[in-house]
Image: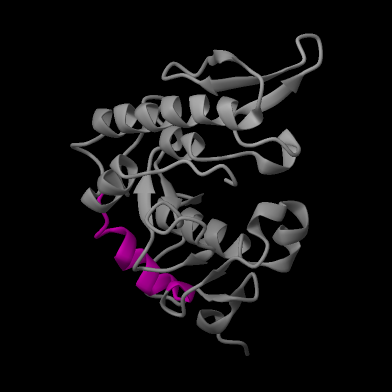
Amino acid sequence: MSNKSNVLVYGIGIKGLKYPSKLNKIFVREYRTWSGMLLRCTEKEWGRKLTYINTTCSENFKSYSYFYEWCNKQIGFKNVDEKGKVWHLDKDLLVKGNKHYSEDVCVFVPQRINSLLISCKRSRGTTPVGVYWYDAKAKFISQCTDVGGKSKHLGSYNTQEEAFQAYKGYKEVLIKQIANEYKDRLDLRAYEALMNYEVDIDD
């Protein structure tokens, strides 16, 4: 007879029996967060979303019991955003470009902040983040999503470097503005990372 406490989740994580995965037949927040993290660490998910290629997690995070307890000690874990959505587990705000989920670098942030830092590199082509080429004007256009979620035109430029600098300046101010909106609810490490965040041309 198999020991259910040792059954691997996504071939990576050990659920154990210490904490429940469901309450009233609904997966609890801890388990949803944990299993979602594990899924992003699988080759199957790498093939579906290339941004997750080579994503891994720490040995501690492979244990649901450890992860469950860790989550409940974290600032932001029990928060919900303006739309009633739970905050997201973020692995690369404190360490830019990080692909390793661990207890040292992960923080919880609202989806609004998570989306703010996505560069959509694959969909935008060869131009820098925030920049696209407009044939009709033979110019590089700079644009950025504003604080209300709408696309904001930042000007037309002769070079992509000029267009990027317009985007960079606007985006960094925007990140600080939104960080200050959540200042009293964010992990201090996350707040400081946002206030010091720099947009790079190769993001």
Q: Residue at x 24, y 31 (%)?
A: 180
**Which residue is most to the bottom?**
1
In the rendered image, residue 13, in percent from the top left (x then y), is placed at 54, 74
Q: Nearer the viewer, residue 10 or 17?
A: 10
User: In what quadrant of the picture does the C terminus appear?
Assistant: top right
Q: Main secondary structure of the magenta part?
A: helix
Residue at 47 percent of width and 34 percent of height: 116
Q: Is residue 157 above or below residue 13?
A: above
- Residue at 57 percent across and 27 percent down: it is 162
Q: Is there any visible trace of residue 28 in the rendered image? A: no
Residue 5 visible in the current orientation: yes
**Which percent across, then down, holds residue 121?**
67, 42
Identify the magenta region.
61-75
The question of residue 149 being in magenta is answered with no
The answer to which image quadrant residue 103 occupies is bottom left
User: Where in the figure is residue 43, as x and y percent of width and height?
Assistant: 72, 67
The relative height of residue 137 versus residue 133 in the rendered view (above or below) is: above
Extreme front residue here? 158
Decide if residue 189 is on the left or right side of residue 43: left
**200 versus 163 height, above or below:** below
Is residue 153 or residue 145 the one in the foreground? 153
Residue 142 occupies which quadrant of the picture?
Answer: top right
Residue drawn at x 49%, y 19% is 149
